[in-house]
Image (cartoon, rainbow, N blue to C red):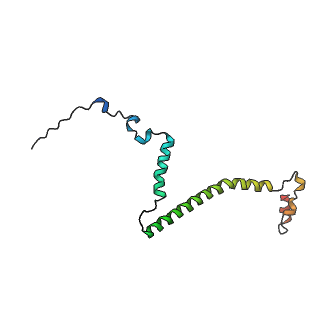
Amino acid sequence: GKSTTVRVSPTPASSLNDGSDEDRKSPAEDLPERQRNLRIAKELGRHVWPPLPGGSNAEERENVTSMRRRVTASIGLMLAGKGVTIATPYLFKGLVDSLPMYSNRESLDVTAQVPSYLPDGLVETLS
């Protein structure tokens, strides 16, 4: 068979990748963290909040408007859920704080709270 000769030119040492993170950084990683986060949010926002079509297609325009309403409602419901999650412990604290407090055991009569259909022996063990 035929043999093929391949010539490889030597690679300059400056272009070799030594595996460090410096060589693998993308241009976006050179930005400060705040700008990088804003860029990510804008990119995601383009997919969540569609632009209105420029043409006169009324059906497509209505579809985009409907999607925008659903996105707005979803964000509103998500924020309401977060509010409920934050408010619940405070609600329970208010309910517990509003319960009457007994300063001593004599003011709490356990036998008065026991239903009459329970046997007397059980009532005596509860008190």
Given residues 109 and 89, the one toward you in this image is 89
Residue positioned most to the left: 1
Residue at left offset 56%, top offset 58%: 75
Tell me if 6 is positioned left or right of 60 in this view: left
Q: Is residue 121 in sight in this rendering?
A: no
Tell me if 36 is positioned left or right of 88 in this view: left
Image quadrant containing the C terminus = bottom right
Given residues 101 and 117, the one toward you in this image is 101
Residue at left offset 13%, top offset 40%: 4
Q: Position of residue 30 (x, y in %)?
A: 44, 38
Tell me if 71 is positioned left or right of 99 in this view: left
Image quadrant containing the N terminus = top left
Given residues 100 and 87, the one toward you in this image is 87
Q: Is residue 3 above or below residue 42?
A: above
Q: Position of residue 38 (x, y in %)?
A: 50, 46
Q: Where is residue 69 in the image (x, y as percent from the top left)?
A: 53, 64
Q: Where is residue 111 in the image (x, y as percent from the top left)?
A: 87, 61
Tell me if 87 is positioned left or right of 7 in this view: right
Residue at left offset 89%, top offset 55%: 107
Q: Is residue 40 in sight in this rendering?
A: yes
Q: Is residue 36 above or below residue 97?
A: above
Residue positioned most to the right: 106
Residue 15: name its quadrant: top left
Q: Is residue 1 above or below residue 20?
A: below
